[in-house]
Image (cartoon, rainbow, N blue to C red):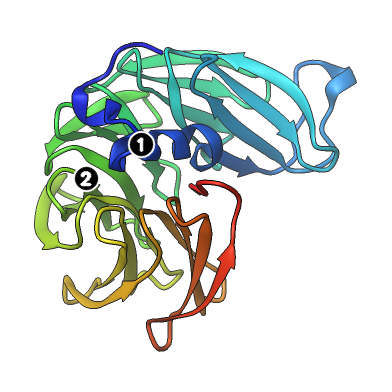
Amino acid sequence: MPSAPARIRRPFSAWGRRLISFATGGALALTGAMALSAPAHAATGPLAYVANINGNTISVIDTSTSAITASVAVGGSPANVAVSPAGKAYVTNLGSNTVSVFDTATNAVTTTVPVGANPLAMALARSGTTAYVTNNDTNTVSVIDTATTTVTATIPVGSAPSGVAVNPAGTTAYVTNNGGSTVSVIDTATNTVSATVPVGTAPNDVSFNTAGTRAYVADHGSATVSVIDTAAGTVTATVPVGNHPAEARINPSGTAVYVTNQSDDTVSVIDTASDTVTTTSPGSPAPTA
């Protein structure tokens, strides 16, 4: 893997482990069934896309058969992948400071977009018209217009931006600043930071509930999940979980948040009504996503 800034290479600290989470679990996207370039490998179910950070490829998996149907060569050290409703896949290439765009119908890379240094996470607006990329080494977010596949804005955020999520309405993007223990709130209409929310130590990841009224931040360094009221822009609860939480994901009904605790080999389940952990389940070693 190409050399990276010290804050990403820290061995199995906030960023060493976070990088692995993107390589093994976080960097997986699902899309509906579609024809592949080779008829013999036609998919019968939804497809999953997995970034292979050491192989410079994206594996395409037919989830109905669990078979790999294609391998797409992309840039250096791909870290994360997202798929748009229009059938385009966007890949952050950590080692080459680019985003690869490929057509999911043909698995052919159509565009390579230069972005900032060490692009790590990416989130697409629900409409698929805009992609937001965290550039971990330049403390910025690149905004990509998916129609033109060009960067239309570069937004300064906090230190070592890691995770990013766009609210369901598409009006704001939340960015976790791993080096600054804050979340930057981006106004997507103006591409400016409208607020900075203090959270726990070394926040890794953020996700919204389906209504967009709450955001859940995995605070890797403080073993907590910060719950942000998005209307007020403040943390309304800090929930203790296991050691080194990597990601927090809410279920579709909005009743529970699942948190992977890397150092404890567990998954915490948070009841969203009470903001308390109701269950702690054993996980695989160093669960990340």
Residue found 15% across the figure and 27% down from its top? 138
Please name the residue that numbered disc 2 is placed on: 178
Bin the neighbour count of mark 1 within 10 Å (Cα to Cα): few under 14, some 14-19, many 20 and up.
some
Is residue 226 placed above or below 271 in the rendered structure? Answer: above
Is residue 215 placed above or below 40 in the rendered structure? Answer: below
Residue found 20% across the figure and 61% down from its top? 200
Q: Where is residue 43, by image quadrant?
A: top right
Q: Amino acid at mark 1?
A: Phe
Residue located farthest toward the right when viewing the structure as drawn: 40
Residue at disc 1, secondary structure: loop
Any part of residue 130 in sight: no
Alpha carbon separation for disc pair 1 and 2: 14 Å
Q: Where is residue 274, by image quadrant?
A: bottom left
Please name the residue that numbered disc 1 is placed on: 12
260 left or right of 135 in image: right
Percent across and percent down for residue 205 are 34, 51
Residue found 72% across the figure and 32% down from its top? 61
Circle on res. 236: none
Q: Nearer the viewer, mark 1 or mark 2?
A: 1
Percent across and percent down for residue 35 are 77, 28
Q: Amino acid at mark 2?
A: Asn
Question: Of marks 1 and 2, which one's residue comes earlier in the chain?
Answer: 1
